[in-house]
Image: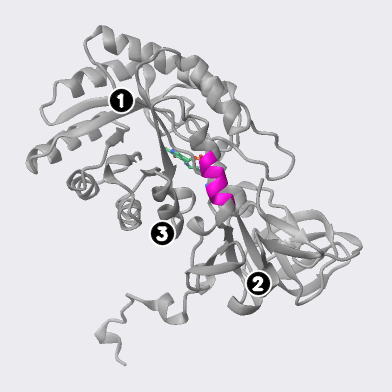
Amino acid sequence: MHHFTYKGNELHCEDVPVSRIAQDIGTPLYLYSHATLLQHFRAFDGAFSDVAHLTCFAVKSNSSLAILKLFAIEGGGADIVSGGELYRALKAGVDPKKIVYSGVGKTGEEIEYALRSEILMFNVESSQEINLLNEVAGRIGKRASIAIRVNPDVDPKTHPYISTGLKESKFGIEIERALEDYTVAAGLRHLRVAGVSCHIGSQLTQVSPFVDALGKLKVLIEKLRETGIAVQYLDLGGGLGITYDKEEPPHPDEYAEALKRELHAQDLTVILEPGRVITGNAGILVARVLYIKRSPEKTFIVVDAAMNDLIRPSLYGSYHAIQPVRRSERRMVKADVVGPICESTDFLAKNRETAVFEPTDLMAVMSAGAYGFSMSSNYNSRPRVPEVMGVGDRYFVIRSRETYEDLVRGENIPDFMGE
Ligand code: LLP
């Protein structure tokens, strides 16, 4: 469910015509629906309301301060993977005691920053990280709460580039080895073993891999208890998928029920790290058609948004629905929707059966709220686009369009090169 719907023939974000926002702000732009974000957060968080839990929104999926703030107000925490994400989460008012920190490559500085910020827990991903964490905590007089991110070797049945819980993946510590590492960690003075964590992949459209992973974690937790290591938190990561095209992922209620059934009688606080399921269908990318280019082989719809704005189609071959902002009786055509970047992979849609577009028409690229802006770049020296939040019949620019000056901020031409 989302609040990007046609009223008459005009696509609206809640009660604001998308064309009005495009007129005022210019294109391309990211547009989020406040009501959709809230509804998705509440549906997810609410599905776990009858068990002790903490919903830590995955900041990487959408790192805008206003969006982080929205979930913080709802009582959510944050799942971070860098010092930069920690900075953003704190700036948005997320309670540090609700922040978990994952990632295979945390630096000493990042660890220190997180320790000083008194975050809830580090999800550690290697034995060396365990030692570094202990060392840094000791040096600054802190005690670090940790969970070991376990790799349960479960096939999430999703795109290989976003699978993380298989043996060959760089993420986590093999479940067979975890016990050994936990025993080491439990003996270190500046660490406190607080939990077990895992994250097996993203855009999962079935419940069974989550349940399989949880089953394996339960066995580990039991073994830990037997060796006298009691954990308080069970972090199950994120990964619940959404509908981009025809996928039929489980509703958060179904996902939660399956997990709760498996969790039965465990005296643990569950941590969830959802990203895409909350923001994915709460945002669109709005672009304007520049040219229609026809060759004997193909039709190209050239728009002003490009792979630097939304890289998912180029990087993963991902499908994003394309919709006209103003609907009319249109012929259908098979076309590639492409941007101005000098790369053959610069496309937003390929061989897509779509309504005919004309130059100056506005286009909505749907389901772009997760891993859209947050993965955008300045490639081809393109300023990053603004982000706008629609709220009822109003809208707010939550991030301004970058200027050419922004593009060169921090750059220097060495003196020896002259003026
Ligand atoms: N927790 C951890 C430790 C993660 O690595 C991720 C995502 C999440 C939570 C949130 O997963 P979600 O609920 O959003 O599926 N750029 C890719 C997705 C990469 C996901 C990386 N990790 C894409 O555009 O599909």
Q: Residue furthest bottom?
A: 419
Q: Is mark 3 within 8 Å of ligand 1?
A: no
Say which mark, if any, is on residue 65.
Answer: 3
Q: What percent of the width, then of the height, locates residue 373?
A: 52, 59
Circle 1 Cα neighbour tier, 10 Å, few/some/many (<14 / 14–19 / ≥20)? many
State the SS at label 2: loop
Camera-side mark, 3 or 2: 3
Which residue in the structure is indicated by mark 2?
304
Give how far apart the Cα atoms at labels 3 and 2 are. 26 Å
Circle 2 Cα neighbour tier, 10 Å, few/some/many (<14 / 14–19 / ≥20)? some
- Whether residue 276 is visible to the viewer of this picture, yes or no, is no
What's the magenta region?
A: 36-42
Q: Is residue 105 magenta?
A: no
Q: What percent of the width, then of the height, locates residue 389?
A: 54, 63
Kindly identify the amino acid type of the residue bearing the numbered disc 3.
Answer: Leu
Kindly identify the amino acid type of the residue bearing the numbered disc 2.
Answer: Asp
Magenta span: predominant SS is: helix
Horizontal side of residue 107 vs 407, given as left or right:
left
Say which mark, if any, is on residue 195.
Answer: 1
Q: Is residue 293 above or below residue 91?
A: below
Q: Is residue 357 above or below residue 106?
A: below
